[in-house]
């Protein structure tokens, strides 16, 4: 699964880790995260994330 990086702060969403503090279980693909999820560091929406190279 691809990793995604927040274009605002550089946080990297890693699907293997998920975001347990926000209720996103490990193994959750970025595409499967609810649309109202926000970056746990800076609070921007999913639309501010890009595929990590």
Image (cartoon, rainbow, N blue to C red):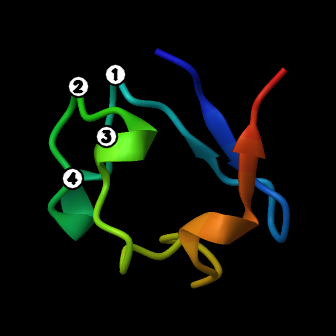
Res 16 label = 1
Give the alpha-carbon distance from disc 1 to disc 4, as whole Å: 11 Å
Helix, strand or loop at mark 3: loop
Whichever of labels 1 and 4 marks the residue nearer the N terminus, that label is 1
Q: Does the CB distance between marks 4 and 2 fall below 8 Å?
A: no
Q: Does the CB distance between marks 2 and 3 fall below 8 Å?
A: yes
Q: Is residue 9 left or right of residue 35?
A: right
Residue 3 in which image quadrant: top right
The spot of residue 28 in percent (x, y) is 25, 35
Q: Residue at x 56, y 66 (%)?
A: 46
Helix, strand or loop at mark 2: loop
Helix, strand or loop at mark 4: loop
The spot of residue 40 in percent (x, y) is 48, 71
Res 8 label = none
Q: Residue at x 31, y 54 (%)?
A: 33
Residue 39 in which image quadrant: bottom right
Helix, strand or loop at mark 1: loop
Q: Does the CB distance between marks 1 and 3 fall below 8 Å?
A: yes
Q: Is residue 13 left or right of residue 6?
A: left
Whichever of labels 2 and 3 marks the residue nearer the N terminus, that label is 3
The spot of residue 38 in percent (x, y) is 47, 76
Residue position marked by numbered label 3 in the rendering:
18
Res 27 label = 2
Give the alpha-carbon distance from disc 1 to disc 3, as whole Å: 6 Å
């Amino acid at each position: 699964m691809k990793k995604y990086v927040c274009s605002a702060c550089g946080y990297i969403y890693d699907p293997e880790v998920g975001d347990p503090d926000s209720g996103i279980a490990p193994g959750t693909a970025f595409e499967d995260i609810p649309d109202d999820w926000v970056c746990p560091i800076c609070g921007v929406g999913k639309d501010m994330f890009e595929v990590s190279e």
